[in-house]
Every structure is written in structure tokens, then in C-alpha cells.
Amino acid sequence: MLKKHSKFFESLLLLTDWFTLSITWISSYYMRFYSGIIPVYKGIPPFRIYLTLLIFMIPLWGMVFKVFGLYRPRRVSTRLSEIIDIGKASTFATLILIALTFLFRQYEFSRLTFLYFWLINIAALSLTRILFREFLRFLRQKGYNQRYALILGTEKLGQDLVKKLQKHPELGIQISGFLTNDPNNVGNTIQGIKVMGKYPDVREFITKFGIDIVFVALPFDAHNQLKEVLNWIGDEMVSIMVLPDLFEFITLRGSVSEFEGMPLISLRDTPLYGWNIIGKRVLDVVFASLVLVFAAPLMIIIAILIKLTSEGPVLFRQERMGMDGKIFNMLKFRTMFIHAEQSTGPVWTKKDDPRCTKIGKLLRRTSLDELPQFFNVLRGNMSIVGPRPERPIFIKNFRNTIPKYMLRHKMKAGITGWAQVCGWRGNTSLEKRIEYDLYYIENWSLNFDLKIIWLTLWNGFINKHAY
């Protein structure tokens, strides 16, 4: 029954995609040659030539979308992930289509038509998918199109799964019951779900309750039973999903990937890879360059004031720890008298710190002392957004007293950060700062960076904890 339902919805999605593809391709032709947005100088090509391309486009899009997994069931997927996959698949298919048009040497196809089509097609396919998924979720919330599941394992992992599934009735997954390895648990109720029997009874309950999905949520010390569990399930026509208890050890951006057919579970990783690195670096270079250009007159004035009011260099270089624990020299406008730490040693700045010069107090209060760090951004030592870098001499103590402190170095250090815009800067809780830094790394995206930059500008540079 499960496969019949899946095949039906797969076919329905395929037909919807083909219809959307045809409409967007025809619309792109008319937009280019009849809308008047951009004048046509070489005459309007026959519509039948463009229509002929649909003979190649329809199977091509079907195959590419199949390869990108866009016809598999996505009950536990997000809208954004599907839209991203649609964008990738449509871009790939469009590039193949453009390459195929070179076979039609007697015709010159409009590049603008392809551009219109690429943009409209992604938008239209994304919209139809969202509407399709929302319709399915509406049906599931009304009790239709349900899938019934068993959970093997009554421990924390299984209980957490129940909580998450109960929060999302739109997924249409009904938990029929738990199975346990402890005979004393049979008959009990956990999270409102009955413990119906023991692991060896799994096949009996699959048949009795028409189970579609078996979630295997064994505790870490019981994973040696996995082979037995799979043998007990046998060749029953159910989907089997294993929740490895390794995920309790995940500390940062855990994920599952595949290498040569082997699943690899990442317990700790950085979000900066592939296009993410390029996107963040482009944002950094463009934004830092603009700031330095527009702030240059102000920086010259600050430099002159520092020189006139105290002895010593204009810029202050201090060792900080950056990404992957690498040490770099962070630049700031000098705000203290030279040899300020000669008598005190390395200590944090405090309110009304006597080591600060008069102009230095103003610079710190307004965060203008940080402006030279945009040169660090251009050098690649820092980013516009990221966890604020700390001095290595302080880090030796922090890593022994604050759990997960060093994980903040899985992202490039920043001039501003999520912790700072949320008020955790200066003389505030280090634990909360780390919590917000790790949240930023876990949820990083370019949109998140832009949001933090906007909040930094919106909130202003004066902060009561900056001194």
C-alpha cells in the first residue's frame, strides 16, 4: 500500500512538473518577443521552433529531477531544502538544454528566453511544490494519507522522536506503539504511546496493525542487537529508519553523508565549505572595501587625534585566536597608553579604566577603535560576522572552565556577531556568549550574516558594556 501511494504521488508530481515546465517555456517565449520589455531587432522566430524543444525538455527535466531526488517522499523535509534542490536541478537541466540547442545549427535561440525561462521555471516549480506539499499536509491533518509506525526502543532517543513527530501532525505519521527489550515495560504508556511488546514481536505487530514504518531507536549500548532486530523484521514490506544514538554526541552541525556507499556520521563540522566559503568571502571583501572607502576620512581624523593626544603608534596589534585555533594579529586603533599592561599583566578592560586615553575612552564607547579590523577582513584573518576573537592567554583558562568553548573557533572570527547584537558583549556572561556563538555556527547562512549586519547598524555602535 505504501509503495502504491508513493508511486501515485510521484506520477502526480511528474505530470504537474511537466505542465509547469511547458507553461513557463511558452510564457518565456512570449515575454521575450511580444512583451516589449526589450526590443526585438532581428525579427520574431517561429513559435513552432521553440515548441519543438519541449520534446527534449520534458524527458530531460523528468530524468534530472529524478536524479536530484525530487520525486522521493519528503514527509520530513523542509520547504527550503526542496526549493534549493529545485534550483540546483533546474539550473543543471537548463545548462544541458542550452548545450543541446547547438545541435540546431540552423536556428539561433534567444539567450534572454533561456534566462527568463530559468528564473520563471524555478519560481513556478517551487510554488507548485509548496502548494502540493501544503495540500498533502492539509489532508494528513484531517486524518487522510497517514502512515503508521512502530518505534523499537523506549529510551530517550525513542521518546525524543515521539515528541518531534507529535509536534508535526502534518507529516501524517501515526505512532502505533513502542517495542522494548525490557519485559517489565510491556503494557506501560510512555508519552501517551503504549509499549505493546518486545523486539522479537515486531513482525507480528507489523502484520496486525498494518505498519508502514519501523523506527529503530536503540540506546547506544544496545546497538549490537541491530542485526537481530533486522532479522526479526525479515522481508516485511516496511520502511526501516535507524536513529543512531551517536547523535547524542553531536556538538556542532551534525550531519550524515555518504562515501562510496558507506554512510558517514559527522559529529562536528564547520558550515564553511564549497559555495558557502565563496559566498561569505565575497560578502566580506565587498562590505569591508565599502566601509574602508567611506570611513577613510574619519579614520584619518582618528589617527591624527591619537597622535596629538598621546605618545605611541596609531594602530595597536594584539594576538587573537581565529578559525581552527590559528593565531593572528588583530588591528585596532590604540586606545591605551603605551606599556599599559606592564604593571597589571594581561587583564580585561574595566569601566573607567585608567589605562585608557581620553580619546581612547570615546573610541571604545563608540566601537570606532574596531575600524582597522576591516583590514583584517581583507587579509582573510577575520570575517564581518562571526564569534569575537579572544586573546590566547585568556583562552587557556576559558577552555578548562567553559564547556565547548573551543568550538566557536570552527568559524572565522568576526567584527560583529550574533552574541554581540543580542547584548552579550564586554563585561557580560561568557557562558551566554558561547551559547549564542554556537547557535550562530549551527544555523549559519548568508541571510543570517546579513541580518546580523543590519542589526549591528540598526542598534548603533554605542553600547553600555563597551569600555
Image (tube, rainbow, N blue to C red):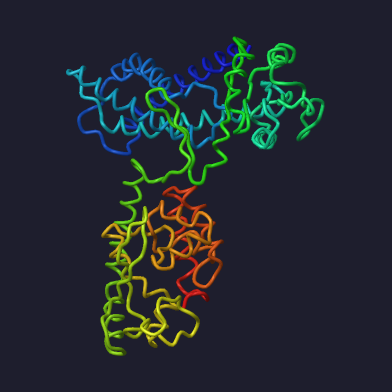
Q: Residue at x 56, y 61 (%)?
A: 432
Question: Image height check: is 95 above or below 308?
Answer: above
Q: Residue at x 68, y 32 (%)?
A: 169
> What is the quadrant of the N terminus in the image?
top right
Q: Residue at x 49, y 53 (%)?
A: 440
| Residue nearer the viewer, 442 or 65 | 442
Q: Is residue 168 left or right of residue 102?
A: right
Residue 344 position within the rendered picture, expressed as x and y whole percent measured from the top left: 42, 82
Question: Image height check: is 460 above or below 246?
Answer: below
Residue 65 position within the rendered picture, expressed as x and y whole percent measured from the top left: 42, 22
Question: Image height check: is 173 above or below 435?
Answer: above
Where, by quadrant of the figure, is residue 145 drawn?
top right
Q: Is residue 299 left or right of residue 193?
A: left
Residue 147 position within the rendered picture, expressed as x and y whole percent measured from the top left: 66, 21
| Residue nearer the viewer, 248 or 22 | 248
Identity of the residue furthest to the left in this view = 105
